[in-house]
Image (cartoon, rainbow, N blue to C red):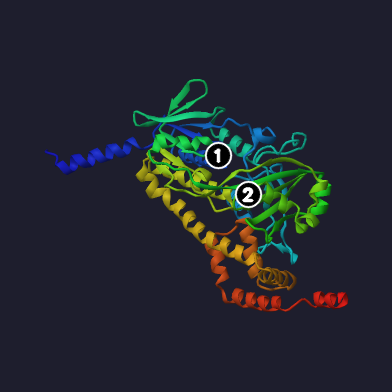
């Protein structure tokens, strides 16, 4: 029986696809042992076990999350939204009590025109404040448990191998990635998952593997840890995250997050520097909420923040997950790490590890985040415009206050602010909420009332006169 040219070509294509399929004995390297790397390894090993596939997973992570301070730091504010807590639980990842430093019951929004406390619109109280590492400097005596360490221990239990080495080079040998590490050591892998984030120099080595990789666009954030007693922090801040929308040039927003004996201050803005940090910490609104002169700062850093990938985050036998590739704009980085890690693992196990496989089965998940971030940029630009006007600040405040005080009121502004701060909902969903007639109507009413001078303020002016 003679075979046609088409049949021979089909066999050739099938053989080529098989070469990009993980098989028994395949070796996978995960560079970075944070949430993105652990989530990827978790789903990779769980799915491999489900189809009786025997693979080896090495996770390269030079840090130990059992240490406090920079040795275990992962540059994160450390808030997990209630929707992600539920999603993790559904996947069998239940956060133990020791990992959650403080259950957050509300968000308090602070402006120069007043404050408003916003309860969860869905009456959920499982939003968690946590530490990615083992806490800041001087935190070694505290009973802190690392979120990243918990995830890492979980994947080790599934069979992953932790390699406490720093990657020093990456290249392609015999059409497969080869990673260099330690003192002249190295290893060849069938797949490399890059999960080291944008604060690692390792991502600059990826061009040798993909040929055209460009690191994501970034900006600077600011994180500072303050130390006190749990009782004092509870007295000052309660069980709430405090968010600040202030009319400060180059300032986007900031949050103060209570975590047991510590408080994390997170700032986001345009090219943050010490002058802007100083201006924020000494703003009267901040001072009346959290007197920093009475609480010492014990640890601080200025991490890079991913603003968007320049190239698609994959190549043949290489895939970028989490912050190394695609993440949500300003919010829910752990949630994005979860989604991209699971999608990349699914593609690798059930479809293949070529660039075409990742394009077909991994990129759609990334693309949804990219498209949502485009809407997010519009949302944050609008927020900047509104917070820079005293009239619109008053309107936002009054609208949220009315919703919180009136039983049965639809929490239009409250839901928007809650989701903007927690990252619980996609930006597209938030934007649609602003187009609802009820939101527009109540915002216009609040704008109208904001144009009328406060009676108390008017009486005060008359007394002064």
- The extreme left residue here reads 2
3D distance between C-alphas at marks 2 and 1: 30 Å
> Of residues 56 and 303, which is closer to you in this image?
303
Quarter of the image with the C terminus in it: bottom right
Residue found at x 23% / y 39%: 11
Ranked by sequence position, the earlier of labels 2 and 1 is 1
Question: Quarter-wise, where is residue 381 in the image?
Answer: bottom right
> Of residues 465 and 122, which is closer to you in this image?
465
> Of residues 302 and 10, which is closer to you in this image?
302
Residue 400, relative to residue 154: is it above or below? Answer: below
Question: Quarter-wise, where is residue 243 in the image?
Answer: bottom right
Q: Which residue is mark 1?
A: 38
The x and y percentages for residue 2 are 11, 38
Residue found at x 63% / y 49%: 272
Image side of residue 442 versus residue 206, left or right:
right
**Residue 313 can be seen in this image:** yes
* Numbered tag placed on residue 394 in the rendering: none
Q: Which residue is mark 2?
A: 272
Q: Residues within 10 Å of mark 2 (few under 14, many from 20)?
A: some
Q: What secondary structure is marked by label 2?
A: loop
The x and y percentages for residue 327 are 52, 49
Is label 2 in contact with label 1 (beta carbons under 8 Å)?
A: no
**Residue 128 can be seen in this image:** no
The x and y percentages for residue 314 are 42, 43
The x and y percentages for residue 107 are 71, 59
Question: Quarter-wise, where is residue 383 in the image?
Answer: bottom right
Q: Residues within 10 Å of mark 1 (few under 14, many from 20)?
A: many
Quarter of the image with the N terminus in it: top left
């Amino acid at each position: 029986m003679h075979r046609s040219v088409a049949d021979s070509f089909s066999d050739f294509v099938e053989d080529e696809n098989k070469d990009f399929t993980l098989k028994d004995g395949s070796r996978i390297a995960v560079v970075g042992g944070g949430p993105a790397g652990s989530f990827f390894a978790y789903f990779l090993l769980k799915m491999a076990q489900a189809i009786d596939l025997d693979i080896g997973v090495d996770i390269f992570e030079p840090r130990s999350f059992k240490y406090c301070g920079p040795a275990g730091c992962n540059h994160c504010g450390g808030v997990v939204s209630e929707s992600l807590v539920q999603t993790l639980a559904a996947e069998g990842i239940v956060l133990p009590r020791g990992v959650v430093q403080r259950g957050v019951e509300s968000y308090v929004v602070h402006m120069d025109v007043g404050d408003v406390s916003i309860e969860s619109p869905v009456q959920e109280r499982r939003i968690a404040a946590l530490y990615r590492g083992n806490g800041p400097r001087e935190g070694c005596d505290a009973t802190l448990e690392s979120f990243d360490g918990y995830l890492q221990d979980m994947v080790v239990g599934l069979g992953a191998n932790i390699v406490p080495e720093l990657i020093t080079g990456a290249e392609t040998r015999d059409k497969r990635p080869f990673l260099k590490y330690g003192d002249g050591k190295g290893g060849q892998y069938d797949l490399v998952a890059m999960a080291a984030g944008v604060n690692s120099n390792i991502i600059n080595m990826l061009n040798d593997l993909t040929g055209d990789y460009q690191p994501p666009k970034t900006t600077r954030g600011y994180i500072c840890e303050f130390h006190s007693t749990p009782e004092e922090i509870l007295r000052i801040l309660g069980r709430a995250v405090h968010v600040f929308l202030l009319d400060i040039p180059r300032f986007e927003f900031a949050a103060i997050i209570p975590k047991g004996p510590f408080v994390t201050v997170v700032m986001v803005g345009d090219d943050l520097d010490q002058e802007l940090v100083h201006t924020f910490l000494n703003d009267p609104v901040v001072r009346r909420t959290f007197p920093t002169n009475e609480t010492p700062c014990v640890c601080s850093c200025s991490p890079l923040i991913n603003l968007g990938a320049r190239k698609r985050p994959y190549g043949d036998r290489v895939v970028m997950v989490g912050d190394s590739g695609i993440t949500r704009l300003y919010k829910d980085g752990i949630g994005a790490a979860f989604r991209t890690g699971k999608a990349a693992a699914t593609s690798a196990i059930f479809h293949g590890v070529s660039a075409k496989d990742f394009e077909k089965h991994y990129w759609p998940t990334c693309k949804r985040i990219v498209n949502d971030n485009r809407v997010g940029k519009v949302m944050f630009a609008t927020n900047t415009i509104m917070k820079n006007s005293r009239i619109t600040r008053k309107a936002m405040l009054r609208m949220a206050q009315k919703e919180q005080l009136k039983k049965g009121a639809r929490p239009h502004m409250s839901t928007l602010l809650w989701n903007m701060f927690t990252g619980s909902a996609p930006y597209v969903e938030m934007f649609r909420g602003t187009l609802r007639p009820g939101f527009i109507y109540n915002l216009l009413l609040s704008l109208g009332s904001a144009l009328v001078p406060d009676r108390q303020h008017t009486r005060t002016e008359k007394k002064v006169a």
